[in-house]
Image (spheres, coloured by chain):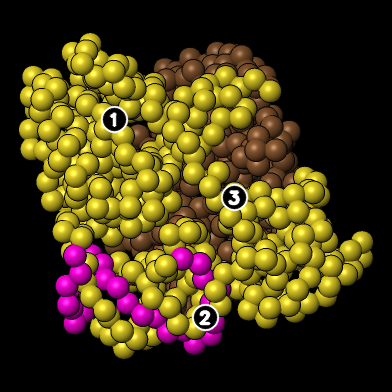
Amino acid sequence: MTEMLTGLSQLDVLEAESIHVMREVAAEFERPALLFSGGKDSIVMLRLAEKAFWPARIPFPLVHVDTGHNFDEVLAFRDKRVAELNARLVVAKVQDDIDAGRVVEIPGGLRNPLQTTTLLRAIEEGRYDAVFGGARRDEEKARAKERFFSFRDSFGQWDPKNQRPELWNLYNGRHNKGEHIRVFPLSNWTELDIWRYIAREGIEVPSIYFAHEREVFARDGMLLGVTPYSMPKPNETVETRVVRYRTVGDASCTGAVESPAKTPDEVIEEVASTRITERGATRADDRTSEAAMEDRKKEGYF
Amino acid sequence: MAVPGLRAHATLLRFATAGSVDDGKSTLIGRLLFDSKSVFQDQLESVERTSADRGDDYTNLALLTDGLRAEREQGITIDVAYRYFSTPVRSFIVADTPGHVQYTRNMVTGASTADLALVLVDARKGVVEQTRRHASLSALLRVPHLVLAVNKMDLVDYSQAAYDEIVADFRAFAAELDLPDVTAIPIAALQGDNVVHRSEAMPWYDGLALLEHLEQVHVSREDAQQRPARFPVQYVIRPMSTERPDYRGYAGTLSSGTLSVGDEVVVLPSGRRTTIEAIDTFDASLPQAVTGQAVTVRLAEELDVSRGDMIVAADAGPTVTSSFDATVCWMADTPLRPGQRVLVKHTTRTVKAQVSTLHDRLDVTQLQGEPADTLRLNDIGRVTVRTASPLAVDAYADDRTTGAFIVLDEATGTTVGAGMVAS
C-alpha cells in the first residue's frame, strides 16, 4: 500500500504541475491562447492542455507565428493535430509584417528575430491576456530566470530585474488592459524529460525529429538543409547525410545533427549522452552573443 | 521501460541553495552540474572563454548559473535561477537564490517549494548572520530537510577541529528552531571534495558526499500523503457535448491526503456533504488519487461547487474563518501598515482582505519579536488578517498548501507579500 501511495514519478510530478498551471490560466483569464509551432515542446504542451480539460475541448485557440520558412512536414503535422482536436488555429505571418513595412527583412534571410513584431501584433489583434509558450528554463540561461507567469507590459517587454516573486503553487496573473502574461507550463522540464514523456505517452512528432537522409551543407559549424530559405553559397559543398533535427524552428537558421536515431527511445539515448545543448548545436540566432536571448526576450520574444 | 540516464520511476527532489555573496554557492552548483555531467560542452566553453576574458585564475563555474547580463557584469546573483540535473535514481531542480540581505524575498521564494535547503558557510568564517537568517527562513517555510555545507575546507587545511566547531555552533542555533532534519557535510566546491565523490583529503569524515545525500534523502510528499484530503477546486469542466451533455467535473490538484471513489467528503465553505462518484483523468478513471495528482472529481450529488471551493475529508476538515493570525514576509518597496487593504490569494480563491493588526517584526537572526509600526521590504512579521469572505485554512506547520497565501496589491496587481497561517 505504502508503495502505491508514494508512487508519483518525476514525470508524473512535472505533468501534474503543468496541468495545474494551465487550469489556473483557463480559470483566471478571459482570452488565453497557446503558441503552437509544431515543435516538440509545443506538441507536449498541447497534449498537456488536452489532458487538463478532458473531456471538454481545449478552451482556447492555438496561435502559430509563421516565419514563412517552414518545414513541410511540420506544417502538415500542425494541421493534422488541429483537425484531430477540433481546435481553432490562428496563423500570424511574419510575411504580412514585412509586406506592411513594419519590419525589414535582414540580409541573409534570418527571420527568427522578426517574429517578435508578429507575435505582439497577434496578441494585440486577438486581445489575448495570457499566452502559453513552450519555453523551458533548461534551454538557456536567461530563460532560467523566467517565472511560470511572466508579466509583460503594454509593449510586450520583459523586465528580468523586476519580476514578481512566485511562491508555492500560487500564481499571480493580475494585469491591466493592454498588458499580458506569458505562461510557461514546461518551465521545469528538460529536453530529456520532453523526450521521455513523448516515449512514455506515445506522442506523435513530425518525422524530421528522427533520422532521415537529407541534402545538407556546413555553415558556422552547423549542418543546414538545402531548402528554398537556406541555399548553399558557391563555396559550400552539398552532401547527403543521415541527420535529424533537435529543434524545429525557422528553416533558414535551424541546423540538423548527424544522427542514426529513428525512434523516441533512440533519441533519448542520444540526448542522454550528448554533450552539446540543443540551442548551441542547432540555432544560429542564439549564437549572436552571451546575452542574445535576454536581449530578445526583453523586447517581447518568447 | 528502461530509459537511459534516468530510471522510469526516478523521483524528483527540489532544493534551494543559500549562502552569502562569497560562500561559493554558484561554484558548488556549477560543480554539481559539471561532475554529474549535466553541463554541456558549449556551455563550458562559453564559461571558459568568459573566465579567460575576465582574467580569472580558474574556470569560474559560477558563470554557469549567473544568466543575466547584469549578474555577469557584477559577478553576483540577482534573481532566483533554476537549474536541472539528474542521476539515474533522481532528478533535481535547484532554486539558486542570492545571498544578499536585501534579497530575503528570493530566499523565501526558493524555499517555498523546496524539499531541502542547502545552506553554505565559509569554513574560514563559520556561522555568520546570513547563515542564521537562512536557517531561520528554512524553518519558517517548513523545508523538511536542511544540509549545512561547510565549504572551502581546503582553506582551513581540511581541519576536522575547524569543521566540528562550526557544526556545533550551528546546531546550538538550530536547536532553537523547528528544523526537522539537519545534516552537515564538509566540502571544497572548487576542487570537488565531498560534492559528488568522497574526499580523500578528509579521511576523518565518514558521512556521505553531498550528491549521495541528495539522492537518498526522503521526499516529503510521503508526509502530506498521510494528512486528511484537501482538494481546492480550480476549474469546473463542462464539455456540453452531445456525448456528455450532463458531465460536470471539478478539476484540481490534490494538495494532501488521498481521495478514493466512495469517500465521504465535505465541500467548503458551504459545508455540504457528499461522496466521490468518480476520479477522472485523460488516461483513465482512477479508484484513488494521491497527493500531488492533477485530476477531475465528480460528486454523487449535484451541488453548487465552483472555483475557490475546497473538497475535503469529511472527518477532518480545515478551519473555515474570516480572521486568522499569520507570519508574513513583506516583498514590496512600499511598507505594510496596519489597517492596509490588500488581496489575498489562498489556494484557488482570491479575496479582499485587511491586515488588521501588526503584532511584531521578527528578527530572524535572533529569533525575537520586536515592536513595529510597519513591515518594510524583506521584513518578516506577525499579523492578523481579516478577509471579506471566509477561507478554509490549515496551519502552515501542518500543510504547506492550505496554510500558505500570497498578498497582492489591489492597485498595481503585484505580489507584495507571502504569508503562512499560524498554528
Q: Which quadrant: the C terminus of chain B?
A: bottom left
Which residue type carries mark 3?
Answer: Gln
The residue lying at 26 percent from left, 37 percent from top is: B148
- Mark-to-mark CA distance, 3 and 2: 24 Å
Q: Amino acid at mark 1?
A: Gly
**Shade representing chain B:** yellow
Count neighbours of disc 1 (C-alpha within 10 A) and say few if under 14, some if 14 to 19, many if 20 or more: many
Q: Colour of chain A?
A: brown
Residue of label 2: B321
Stretch in magenta: B368-395
Task: Give the spatial CA distance, label 1 vs label 3.
Answer: 36 Å
Q: Based on the picture, tell me whether residue B385 belongs to the magenta stretch.
A: yes
**Mark 2 residue crowding within 10 angstroms, few (<14) / some (14–19) / many (20+):** some
Q: Taking A84 as reference, is B270 left or right?
A: left
Q: Which mark is residue B226?
A: 3
The residue under label 1 is: B30
Badge 3 crowding class, 10 Å Cα cut-off, few under 14, some 14 to 19, many 20 or more, is few
